[in-house]
Image: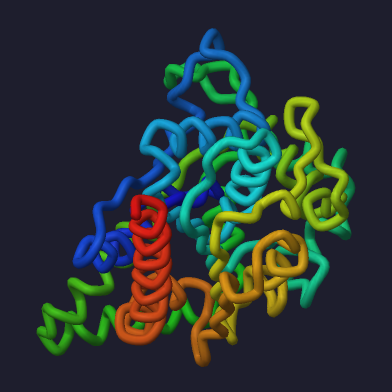
Amino acid sequence: MCAPLSGHHATLLRDTVRTLLQDHKVYLTDWIDARMVPLEDGEFHLDDYVAYIQEFIRHIGAKNLHVISVCQPTVPVLAAISLLASRGEDTPRTMTMMGGPIDARKSPTSVNSLATQRSYEWFENNVIFTVPPNYPGVGRKVYPGFLQHTGFVAMNPERHAASHWDFYQSLLRGDEDDAEAHRRFYDEYNAVLDMDADYYLDTIRVVFQDFSLAEGTWDVAGERVRPQDITRTALFTIEGELDDISGDGQTYAAHELCTGIPEKNKRHFPAEKCGHYGIFSGRRWRTIIYPQLRDFILEHNKAAKAVKEKAEV
């Protein structure tokens, strides 16, 4: 399970992981807050993110692995698996992309529009700050988590205001269950981190301005990313009907890029009445979306087992 590196720790995926653990052994990525990383530990770019994903896949073992990515990591995860395939290395049995900007040109949201309306230099000059002396990463250039948090809240201020009002009403009524549910959600939602400036700016350019993955022009450490080289990994994409972060068709675009995967090994699920967080957290995730994902993984586990048994005969 590849958690987003987009301003939050992996805490937002607690419900996702809790549900997956019913049927699976789960490995979860998380990322160190950039303000806690000393300058002498070096730089961190989007290419490094891709390299880490490949390292994780090799370490666990690709042959029995199912990779799930939520939102931001759909792009580097697809790149990582593409590069493994191009080199002739083992690739995971399945890859599931959930609500991610594979092609951010499709149904652009306010997040996409901001990135296209502002220049790379604007982001470099207006949202990048230096870590102050009271942190181990003093001197490192970062995109601060509090800015990302402010941006997320600003996208839906009415919803957040209503949620806090409901919390107040729950306290007045003495409804501790509702109040505690509110606290749990915002404890996770407010768990923000700073992102390394190099990584953040790479993401703005590659994903949201140049659309390098969709255009077929992305080179990672000098190697061209070729999703069409993936042939042995099944693909499942999931999109939320009401997603206001990754618009309709942005995740489905993976099917258009992964032309080497047989159609019988591709699946797409449009989740009705689901916003961005609803596709991986909450009642609809647990009762509607997860059963689809579980069955997809089981189907390809059985297919791989049948192929192995046939080869041994």
> Where is residue 221 drawn, in percent x and y?
74, 26
Residue 226 against residue 224 in the figure, above or below: below
Image quarter where the C terminus lies is bottom left
Q: Of residues 64 and 237, which is closer to you in this image?
A: 64
* Number of on-image labels: 0
Looking at the image, residue 17 sits to the left or right of residue 196; the answer is: left
Residue 15 visible (yes or no): yes
Residue 29, quarter of the rendered image? top left
Q: Of residues 156 and 45, which is closer to you in this image?
A: 45
> Where is residue 200 drawn, in percent x and y?
67, 40
> Where is residue 47 drawn, in percent x and y?
67, 32
Looking at the image, residue 4 sits to the left or right of residue 308; the answer is: right
Q: How is the image coloured?
A: rainbow
Residue 101 against residue 92 in the figure, above or below: below
Q: Residue at x 47, y 41 (%)?
A: 193
Looking at the image, residue 94 sits to the left or right of residue 169; the answer is: right
Residue 184, quarter of the rendered image? bottom left
Q: Residue at x 62, y 20 (%)?
A: 43
Q: Residue at x 29, y 52 (%)?
A: 26
Q: Residue at x 35, y 67 (%)?
A: 302
